[in-house]
Image (spheres, rainbow, N blue to C red):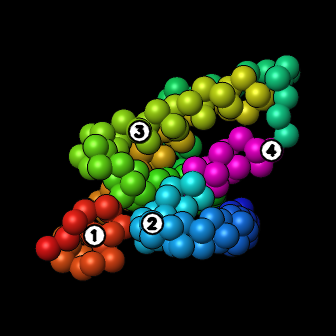
Amino acid sequence: MHRIEAYIRLAIIFIMIITILYFPVLMILKKKGKNIIRQFGNLGLCCSIFLIIFATILFVPITFHPEQYVINLVPFNWEDDTNQIIVEVIPNIMMFVPLGFFIPVIFKNKRKLYKTTIMVFLLTFSIEFFQYFIGRSADINDIITNLLGGIIGYCIFKICNVIFKRTKWWNKLIDCKGK
C-alpha cells in the first residue's frame, strides 16, 4: 500500500508544481481572450502524460546496458499473490484513467472509444518497449491494465458528456459551441 500512497503523493505534488508553473501562461491567455477552461483540459492532459512517464520510466534508475532483459508475455500469472495485484494492477489502472478522460476532452477527433483506446495503447506499448531496453521489465499485464484504465477514463468522459452536455463550462472544456 505504501507504493500506491507514494504515487498519490507524487501525483499531487507534481500537479501542484505544474499548475503553479502554468499559472502565468493562463493569465496571459486570459488577457488575450482565450478559452481558460479549455486550458485546464490541456493542463490535465500534460499532467497525466508527465505523471505516466515519471512513474514508468523516470522513477527508477535507467541503464542502457542491463544485466538481463525481462519480458513477460503471459498475462496475469501471479499464483495468487494478492500483494502483487494491489501493488501493480491498481496503480496501473489509476495512472491511465486521467489519460483516457483527457484525450477525448482535448482531441475532438478522438471521441470514439476505439480511437482513444488506440492512443492509450500506443503510449503504453511505447513505454513497455522502452522499459525493456533500460533494465526494467516489459510486461503484458501493464499493457492490459493500462488499457483498462484508459477505457475507464473514456467511460467517465462519456458519462460527464451526458450529464454536463448543456452546461457552458463543459462545452468550453470540450471546445463545443453549446446550446
Q: Earlier in the sequence, mark 3 or mark 1?
A: 3
**Residue 56 drawn above or below residue 99:** above
**Residue at left offset 41%, top offset 38%:** 119
**Residue at left offset 73%, top offset 33%:** 136
Residue 8 as seen in the image, left or right of residue 173: right
* Closer to us: 15 or 138: 15
**Residue at left offset 47%, top offset 53%:** 99
Nearest to viewer (mark 3 / mark 1): 1
Nearest to viewer (mark 4 / mark 3): 3
Nearest to viewer (mark 3 / mark 2): 2
The three-letter amino acid code for the residue at tag 3 is Met
Circle 4 residue: 60
Marks 4 and 2, Cα distance to the nearest angstrom? 39 Å
Q: Earlier in the sequence, mark 2 or mark 1?
A: 2
Query: Does 59 lie within the magenta span?
Result: yes
**Residue at left offset 32%, top offset 62%:** 174
Query: Does 76 lie within the magenta span?
Result: no
For the stretch drawn in magenta, the main secondary structure is: helix
Circle 1 residue: 171
Marks 3 and 2, Cα distance to the nearest angstrom? 27 Å
Q: Are marks 2 and 1 in contact (CB under 8 Å)?
A: no
Marks 1 and 4, Cα distance to the nearest angstrom? 40 Å
Q: Earlier in the sequence, mark 1 or mark 4?
A: 4
Q: Determine the residue located farthest toward the left in the rendered image.
A: 179
Q: Which residues are magenta?
A: 48-60
Please identify the quarter of the rendering in which residue 27 is found.
Answer: bottom right
Circle 2 residue: 34
**Residue 105 drawn above or below residue 76:** below
Circle 3 residue: 119
Marks 4 and 3, Cα distance to the nearest angstrom? 25 Å
